[in-house]
Amino acid sequence: MSEHIRFTRSRREFLTDAFCGMGSLAFTQMLFEEKLRAASTTNPHANPLAPRPPHFAAKAKSVIFLFMAGGPSHLETFDPKPLLNKLDGQTRPKEFGEVKYQFVTNNAKILGTKRTFQKYGKNGIEVSDLLPHTAKVVDDLAIIRSCHGDMVVHSAAQYQLFSGRIIPGFPSMGSWAVYGLGSESNSLPAYIVSPDPDGALEGGQPMYMHGFLPAVYQPTMLRAGKKPILNLDLPPGVQLDKRRNTVELIRKLNEANLKATVEAEDDEFRARMNSYDLAFRMQTEAPEVFDIAKESQETLDLYGVGKDATDDYGRRCLLARRLVEKGVRFVTVVHGGGPGNLQWDAHDDIEENHIRMAAQADQPCAALIQDLKRRGLLDSTLVVWGGEFGRSPEAQGGKGRDHHNYGFTMWMAGGGIKGGQVVGATDDIGLKAVEKPYHFRDVHTTILNQLGLNQDALSFLHQGRKERLTEIQGSVIKEIV
């Protein structure tokens, strides 16, 4: 018997002989994980955030929404209107039609702009002097000058921007994306919102939320400041295996409770169970992801980290890149918070407000595009920039501009978007979208399209009706995809 057994003569020979066995063990574990992921599509008790295939071939895996809260003026950023300065101080000519505002009166005067525009990029796209850093990446941007929405007040417009509805209670586009695709990360939240440290917005937290979708699709709200998530580190003296045992005990108790009570279909309870598991997994990986100090000084400088104006938004844009790099599906990075003038809400003085706000956001936004591109992530990451509306051509109070939902600018980049172009147009004073107008629902449809999601197929039965993000039929902005 022993003559058929050959013993290894060295450590290298042992590793060579054992290679196939070790590989088989690793392959078995990979198959087991894939089985768990596949089971989640049919088993309601499995991980509801496991990745799911898109409806068709996707261009993007993740979305970063750079939300400019309060309504940045298209007239001072991406949509130059020379006629504004010629009509400065005059009432609006009747040929432009009528619109309804919140504060601007019928006898208000046209307000010219002090901003200057220059042509940038291969196609000579005009960008304001407020945005010198963004101008450098204009070849990657598809600028949509003909966006419009239905509401002129912040809260309703913010709800429509995020959920397609003008009232709270409906799922945000981030929740819809995760509902459709799950998450690529097993140790980080699928949908993250990074709010502005200056305070809450008029729409409040409901605009980001999951609405009637199961609670597991709600966002993880980060904290303001340099420590966006507390208690990621294990408590002193607590070992990882002990924490694992604790979490496993909690899970078993919860599962037993589900089987024994009518809460078996309680999605809030299931979401709470999932959050315990996710919190434990985050303690193993998230501390490193949220520690931007490990980035090179060149990268920190690129985002403006360490500079007074750009430090906060620069940190949060850099973190957004690190999150999608690790498989997070949807990240919203809010710029502007708290009352009025701390947002892009320039009622009193458009110059003071926009100079200050642009100085905070311009460099970080451009840096995000540059950083994603050089790391090979821009192709798979869709970046969207914009607010809930623009600003009025007429003056409010002499130097400010009112809310304006009839025509304004947003832009997209990466994720299969054709950059270096301008789509659509407003009229000669920027009052109304007149050429290829695109509603918020068209923006949503385009985002879903780049993620490989069909707006009709991505639905959820709620109170007897199949609901969807776009409510009624939206159109893909074909010029940019």
Image: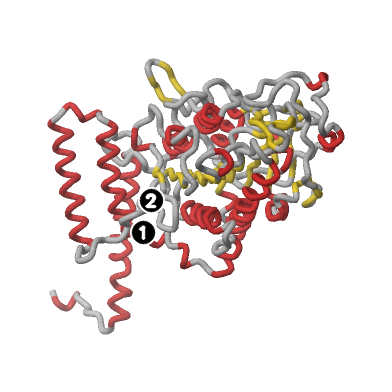
Q: Is residue 241 above or below residue 107?
A: below
- Which residue does the image show at 64% across and 45% down from the upper left? 353
What residue is pinned by disc 2?
188
Give neighbour class at mark 1: few <14, some 14-19, many 20+ (Cα, 10 Å).
some
User: Can residue 478 be seen by looking at this rendering?
Assistant: no
Going by the numbered disc 2, the residue's amino acid type is Leu
| In-front residue for pair 72/276 | 72
In the image, is 91 to the left or to the right of 54? right
User: Can residue 172 be seen by looking at this rendering?
Assistant: yes
Residue farthest to the bottom? 9
Quarter of the figure with residue 438 = top right
What residue is pinned by disc 1?
285
Going by the numbered disc 1, the residue's amino acid type is Glu
Residue farthest to the front? 397
Asked if marks 2 and 1 touch (Cβ < 8 Å), the reply is yes
Indicate the quadrant containing the C terminus: top left, top right, bottom left or bottom right.
top right
Q: Secondary structure at mark 2?
A: loop
Give neighbour class at mark 2: few <14, some 14-19, many 20+ (Cα, 10 Å).
many
Q: Position of residue 184 (x, y in %)?
A: 42, 48
- Which residue does the image show at 67% across and 46% down from the upper left? 352
Q: Position of residue 327 (x, y in %)?
A: 45, 51
Mark 2 vs mark 1: which is more N-terminal? Answer: 2
In the image, is 202 to the left or to the right of 48? right
User: How many numbered circles does the render carry?
Assistant: 2
Indicate the quadrant containing the N terminus: top left, top right, bottom left or bottom right.
bottom left
